Image (cartoon, rainbow, N blue to C red):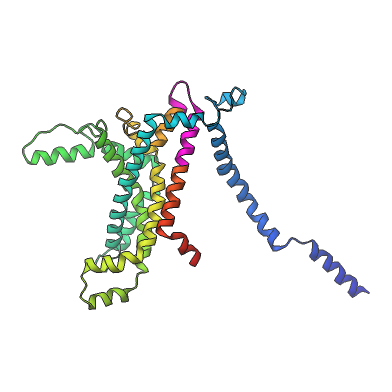
Amino acid sequence: MSLSSDSVDRSWLTDRLPSSEDKAGALALPGLIAYTGFMLFPLFYLVFLSFTNARPPEDLINSNWTFIAFDNYLNLFQNPQFWQSMGITWLFVFCSMTLKIGFSIFVALVLTHERVKGKRYMRAIVIIPLGLPGIFKITVWRSIFSNARFGLANTLYINIMELFGASPGPIQWLANRWLAFLSYVVTELWLAYPFMVIIIVSALQDVSGELHDAAKVDGAGYFHRFVHVTLPAIKRPVWFASILTAAASFQQFLVPFVFNEGGPARNNELILVYGYREAFVRTPQNMALASAIMFSALIFIAMFMWINVKKGRLADGVQNA
C-alpha cells in the first residue's frame, strides 16, 4: 500500500510541475513585455497620432483632438519640403552605401592579405570607432569640416594650395549645399565602415584557398580571382551588411543636425530632421504630422529592406541553413 501511495503522490506532483513549454514561455515573458513596451507600444502610439489633429502632447491629455483619418498624410504628400527631404535622404543612402561597400571591401582585403604584417593591430584600430560615443564622433567630424581656418579639412586644403603658391581662404564646407552633403557622406562612411569590415573579413576567411590555387594554376590574375572567386563567395554577407547599414543611413539624424541642422536653407534636411522640425521646432508644434512623417519613413525603410532581402535571396539562405 505504501509503494502504491508513493507512486500516486509522485504522479500527482509530476502532473502539476510546469512543462518545458511552460518554462520556455515564462523565460520569454520578460523579453516579450519589454519588446511590447519599448517597440510595439510606441509604434502603435505613432500610428494613432498620425490619424489625429493633436499638436502638442497636452492635446491628448486634455482630449483636445479629433480623428481626421488620412488628412495628415494628404497634407504631407502635397508638401514639397517632404519630397525634397525624402529625395535628399535617398541620395544620402545611395552615396554612403556605395562608398561603404567599396571602401569596406578594400580594407577587408588588406586586413586578410597574406603579405600584410601586423594585421591584428590593424584590425584593432579599424574597430575603434565602434567603441566611441556617437555624439562624440560626430562632434569631432563637425570640427574637421568647420568653416573656420583651423578646421582640419581647411588646414590641409590651405597648406596644399600654399605649396603651389596660392593663398586661398577657408572653404565654407557647411555653408554650401553640396559640400555639406559631402561632409555628411564622409562622416557616415567613417561611422559605419567598421561594422561592414568585420562582416566582410569573417566572410573572406571562409573563402576556400583551394579555389584561389586552382585559379592561379589556370593563369588567373589577382583581379580575375577577386571578381570570379572572392566576390561570389562573399556576396551574401556583403549584401546583408549593406542592407543593415543602408537602413541605419536612412534613419540618420545626428550627423545633419549637429553639422548644420540640415542646411543651408533646409536643402540637406534628411527625413528625420524634417520630422523633428515639425514636432519640436515649428510653431505651432504639429505632433500628428510629425508622426505621419515618421510612420511614412518606417514604411519606406521596411519596403527597402524587404525588396533588398528578396533581391539578395537572403531569406532563401536562412531557410536552407
Most foreground residue, 168 or 312: 312
Residue 235 drawn above or below residue 275: below
Q: Give the range drawn in magenta.
A: 279-298
Q: Is residue 117 visible?
A: yes
Residue furthest left as drawn: 165
Q: In this view, does 214 lie above or below 50?
A: below
State which quarter of the image contains the N terminus. Answer: bottom right
The residue at 20%/75% (across/down) is 219
Direction from residue 259 to residue 64 in the image, left or right: right
Question: At 26% from the left edge and 66% from the top edge, which residue is drawn?
Answer: 226
Q: Which of 130 and 277 is in front in this view?
A: 277
Asked whether the viewer can see residue 321, the reply is: no
Q: Is residue 316 toward the left or the right of residue 104 in the image? A: right
Q: Residue furthest right?
A: 1
Residue 109 x, y percent position in the rendering: 28, 62
Residue 23 at x, y percent in the picture? 69, 59
Left or right, 53 with reference to 165: right
In x, y percent, where is residue 84?
35, 34
Q: Nearer the viewer, residue 245 or 156?
A: 245
**Residue 297 within the segment the image draws in magenta:** yes
Q: Is the magenta stretch mostly helix, strand or loop?
A: helix
Q: How many marks?
A: 0
Q: Does the magenta stretch include residue 214?
A: no
- x, y percentage for residue 223? 22, 66
